Image: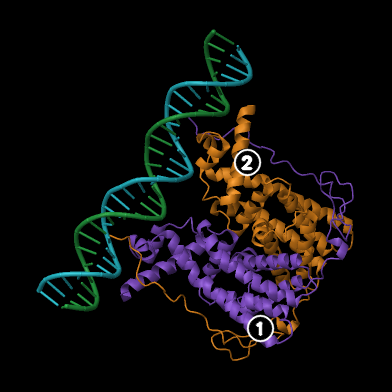
Chain colours: A orange, B purple, C green, D cyan
DNA sequence: ATTCGTTTGAAACGTTTGTTTGAAACGTTT
DNA sequence: AAACGTTTCAAACAAACGTTTCAAACGAAT
């Protein structure tokens, strides 16, 4: 554990974090990591044992403190609320703020971290699923019980799914913020963390606090004689009959001849 | 274009769609595809030219009709609304319903398709980004202009980001529905398409229709003397001072000795 | 200065990958 | 039946990958 070996270890894990975030686990080769880190190829297996272990190390050093901080903030919020249920916006803030602080630390490092976390939640590596499952479920249950007190009128399945919608919105927007800024031609960009936080909380809080479905509405109301299972929905009748829109067939097969190499 | 060759082509593309959805592009080898499809390895390059082209074919035959249908439904909704702006719930329905119909066609095929689409939006393959960019922007602009009329009080950046939140929630929940059902121990599962649609629309509509930020609130209000850039936010004061929560250091380095192979 | 455990270095290993090859089988047309 | 283009097949190809090896370099303790 000489200071030099620690430096090598750090250079590897930092470079790996960036490349895993930018390109994903599969597309990032160890040679690319070691080249950009300026270390020898064998150093990865020496310090981390394997490529998978390197990925574990990269992810764990961020995700673990992240979720611990969320738990702490949640407990703190509960204590401050006393007997009252914790406000929805406070709950959301405990979830989002620790993420945004790590992601928007000014440097370019945070962005790749966000992408990495988003990537791992959207399409986790098979060898990581079992390891993170327990921690994720614990966190999920914690938020579920808290929000159940905050939103007592909401049926449990409704609450469950709304939480998933919120998480999806948070991750998607967070991981793609840079792309979105670029896609909109530089408009809509703001590097203010508090503004980002407010936007996310505004949206998710409204979604979570939306009125619960009418009692009879939960069950299916489909009674109109739509053609092939395309029954219209509810409330508004604007798009009542969508049977007019035909399900387009796979593809019109523009080019029929296959693509062999010209002999 | 003999019927036999078409059958081979179809078996390849169907198997590839399933495997790409379940495992992703990188982790799926052509040998796995051809083995499970019961065709020869060389058939892929003969019929599609390359692995990337196979992925293109898989994706295009679904995404293209999907977006075309959304456009059609959107136009239809506009015509039905006449002079009035299209209701938010109708706009959302034009976006979600075509997706859900493809995903929940009863068979297990739809699920992998949803995962594939979700995967491609969360972490697109590099060679596909440029190709799908134009179409995606077109669709995005269409929805932006429509929702701008529906929600006239919302500043453009606010609308833009809320749309991204909604898309993220939709994709995340849709792609992981099966995992969520399993994680919750079989609870919270409902295979009713209309119920799923209603839940998504309820959440997203409330989020989009949330009151716009107060005029002075858009700019930063951070004035409190927080320590290292962790300024508290707005409205509620429950979590006002979060400086108490220390930013945990990377990792406590439990095991110091590296992991070489025992000599 | 010598020894010993630790860390680095260059090279190679074995495997898997997408792709290509060339001959055989097939179906259609002449 | 012969000739042709199309499709399949087994085999091999070159490249890239994660991993391993082993000697050299290093640092600290004796």
Please determine whether, in this image, residue B240 is positioned above or below residue B47.
Answer: above
Q: Are discs 1 and 2 both within one chain?
A: no
Is residue B235 positioned above or below A157 on the image? Answer: above
Seen as rendered, the residue at the extreme front is: A185
Residue A225 relative to residue B109: left or right: right
Residue B178 percent location from the top left of the image? 59, 67
Residue situated in front as seen by the camera: A152 or B37: B37
- Quadrant (top left, top right, bottom left, bottom right) of the C terminus of chain A: bottom left
User: Label for residue A14?
Assistant: 2
CA neighbours of label 1 inside 10 A, class few (<14), some (14 to 19), many (20+): many
Q: Taking the image as drawn, is residue B98 in sight?
A: yes
Q: Which residue is mark 1?
A: B77
Circle 2 residues within 10 Å: few <14, some 14–19, many ≥20: some
Which residue is at the front of the view, A257 or A72? A257
Task: Determine the residue positioned at 82% across, 69% down.
Answer: B212
> Dot 1 falls on which chain?
B
Q: Is residue B138 left or right of residue D1?
A: right
- SS for callout 1: helix
Give the image location of residue A211, x and y in percent.
Answer: 78, 76
Residue at horizontal 89%, vertical 46%? B225
Task: Give x and y (percent) for residue A262.
Answer: 30, 61
Work out whether residue A1 can be spotted: no
Report how far apart the C-alphas of labels 1 and 2 lie in the structure: 50 Å
Q: Quadrant of the N terminus of chain A?
A: top right
Q: Is residue C18 above or below residue B13?
A: above
């Amino acid at each position: 554990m000489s200071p030099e070996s620690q430096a090598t270890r750090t250079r590897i894990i930092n470079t790996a974090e960036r490349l895993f975030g930018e390109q994903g686990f599969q597309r990032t080769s160890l040679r690319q990591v070691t080249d950009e880190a300026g270390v020898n190829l064998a150093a990865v297996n020496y310090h981390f044992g394997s490529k998978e272990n390197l990925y574990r190390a990269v992810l764990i050093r961020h995700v673990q403190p992240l979720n611990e901080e969320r738990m702490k903030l949640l407990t703190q919020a509960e204590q401050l609320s006393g007997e009252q249920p914790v406000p929805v916006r406070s709950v959301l803030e405990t979830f989002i703020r620790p993420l945004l602080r790590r992601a928007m630390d000014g440097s370019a490092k945070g962005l790749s971290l966000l992408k990495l976390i988003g990537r791992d939640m959207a399409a986790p590596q098979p060898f990581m699923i079992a390891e993170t499952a327990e921690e994720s479920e614990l966190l999920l249950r914690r938020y579920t019980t808290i929000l159940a007190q905050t939103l007592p009128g909401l049926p449990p399945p409704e609450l469950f799914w709304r939480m998933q919608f919120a998480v999806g919105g948070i991750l998607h927007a967070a991981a793609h913020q840079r792309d979105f800024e670029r896609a909109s031609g530089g408009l809509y960009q703001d590097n203010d963390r508090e503004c980002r936080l407010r936007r996310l909380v505004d949206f998710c809080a409204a979604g979570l606090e939306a009125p619960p479905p009418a009692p009879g509405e939960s069950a299916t109301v489909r009674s109109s004689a739509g053609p092939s299972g395309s029954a219209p929905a509810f409330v508004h009748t604007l798009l009542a009959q969508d049977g007019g829109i035909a399900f387009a067939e796979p593809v019109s097969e523009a080019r029929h001849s296959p693509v062999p190499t010209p002999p």
